[in-house]
Image: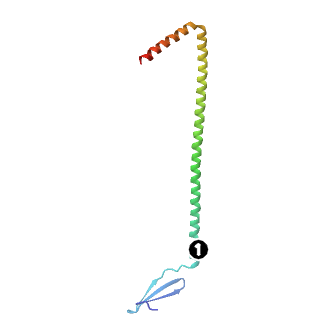
Amino acid sequence: MLHGADDHRLEKRGAKRRCYMADEASGMSQDIEAPKEVKAPEMNQDVDALKEDVRRLREDLASLTESLKKVAHGGAEIGRARAQDELERLYEQFQETYDSVRREGGRARTGLEKEIGERPFITLLGAFLVGIVLGKFMSAR
């Protein structure tokens, strides 16, 4: 077969393939290595290996996505648990303070009742004087 000025012929010798180029004008030939032909079974194996790699990458990506979701959900659970613990601690502190104020208020009331019962006239005079002072203060405004 003639292709322009070059005649290309492929010849198989053992495991090597060579390409002979003959120049019609000069009659000289040159020995050139031809690229190795990829056989269909080898190509199928390579394609299958690539498909398997892509499948594994998809599985790894899905696994990584699932792990990230679990970490995010776990972080939210930890944050919620910490907030719940802090809320319970503050409620207990409030309850203790409320109980303490209530006890002290009860003691003050008992002490005041006792004081009024022992000295009713002085208590009445003190209340009268406090009323006058507050009245003067309010009228000055």
Q: Nearer the viewer, residue 119 or 69?
A: 119
Q: Position of residue 14 (x, y in %)?
A: 54, 85
Vertical side of 13 occupied by 59: above or below = above
- Asked if residue 135 lies left or right of residue 26, the reply is right
Q: Which of 68 and 22 is in front in this view?
A: 68
Q: Which residue is drawn at 58% across and 70% down?
A: 49
Q: Residue at x 60, y 31 (%)?
A: 92
Q: Position of residue 76 (x, y in %)?
A: 57, 46
The number of numbered badges drawn on the structure is 1
Please name the colour scheme applied to the rendered image: rainbow
- The residue where tag 1 is placed is 45
Q: Farthest residue to the left: give it.
A: 25
Q: Farthest residue to the front: give it.
A: 139
Q: Nearer the viewer, residue 102 or 130?
A: 130
Q: Where is residue 109 in the image (x, y as percent from the top left)?
A: 60, 17
Q: Residue at x 59, y 55 (%)?
A: 66
Q: Which residue is drawn at 48% across and 12% down?
A: 132
Location of the C terminus by quadrant is: top left
Q: Position of residue 35 (x, y in %)?
A: 49, 80
Residue type beneath disc 1: Gln
Vertical side of 54 occupied by 24: above or below = below
Q: Residue 119 is drawn in which quadrant?
A: top right
Q: What element carries label 1?
A: helix
Q: Residue 137 is drawn in which quadrant?
A: top left
Mark 1 packing: few (<14 Cα in 10 Å), some, or many (20+)? few
Vertical side of 141 occupied by 129: above or below = above
Q: Which of 63 and 98 is in front in this view?
A: 98
